Amino acid sequence: MNKHLIGALAALFVNAAAWGQGAMPLLELSAGFHRIEAEVAATDRDRQVGLMNRREMPPQRGMLFDFDHENTHCMWMRNTLLPLSVAFVDAKGVIINIADMKPQTEDNHCAKVPARYALEMNVGWFAQRGIKPGMKLGGIDKAPRPH
């Protein structure tokens, strides 16, 4: 087997492993005129793993953490290689607050008031599009229920 084929297979394996961690369902959300393809982390395992160990994420892709109850949930970045922004969202889809998070840190980033969801996107995604607290995400009502 030549080294180019081995390299291509290795890259394919790494990408498949990263994007196939548990084969989370995809949910289409909107923030203003912007479309989001959100992987939904609705199980304890998926919420614990989140976006850990991934090296890249397409600009329109993110992860929606669907918790089983409203609370002042907190997020951290242990084993997460990508810089991310997180929006904490209430049960109606209204953004409560947004925080930027540095890779591979254990700093807590928490909802300012009880939130039902957290949406992680590439760092700066919300700011670059003028998405701010008080704005509503479309499609959140179609999120699979946590289990």
Image: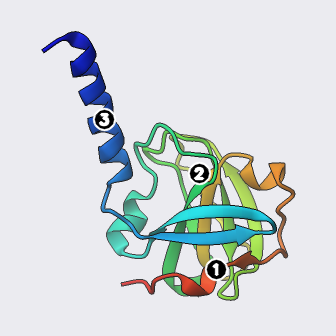
Please tell me which of labels 3 and 2 falls first in the chain. 3
- The quarter of the rendered structure image containing the N terminus is top left
Q: Secondary structure at mark 2?
A: loop
Q: Earlier in the sequence, mark 1 or mark 3?
A: 3
State the image coordinates of residue 22 (x, y, percent, origin top left): 30, 62
Q: Which residue is mark 1?
A: 139
Q: Which residue is found at the position 61% from the left and 65% from the top? A: 119
Which mark lies nearer to you, 1 or 2? 1
Return the residue at label 2. 107
Whether pointer 3 and pointer 2 mark residues with C-beta atoms closer than 8 Å, the reply is: no
Report crowding for label 3: few under 14, some 14 to 19, many 20 or more residues within 10 A (C-alpha): few
Mark 1 to mark 2 CA distance (whole Å): 30 Å
Gap in angstroms between the C-alphas marked 3 and 2: 32 Å
Q: Which residue in the protein does label 3 denote? A: 12
Amino acid carrying mark 3 in the image: Leu
Q: Residues within 10 Å of mark 2 (few under 14, many from 20)?
A: some
- Marks 1 and 3 sit apart, C-alpha to C-alpha, by 31 Å
**Image quadrant assignment for residue 146:** bottom left
User: How many residues crowd around disc 1 within 10 Å: few (fewer than 14), some, or many (20 or more)?
Assistant: some
Q: Is the C terminus in the top left, top right, bottom left or bottom right quadrant?
A: bottom left
Is 49 left or right of 101, judged from the image as shown?
left
Q: Position of residue 36 (x, y in %)?
A: 64, 62
Q: Position of residue 23 (x, y in %)?
A: 33, 62
Q: Is residue 115 above or below residue 1?
A: below
In the rendered structure, which amino acid carries the disc numbered 1? Gly
Above or below — where is 3 with respect to 144?
above
Please identify the residue farthest to the left as the structure is shown. Answer: 1
Badge 1 element: loop
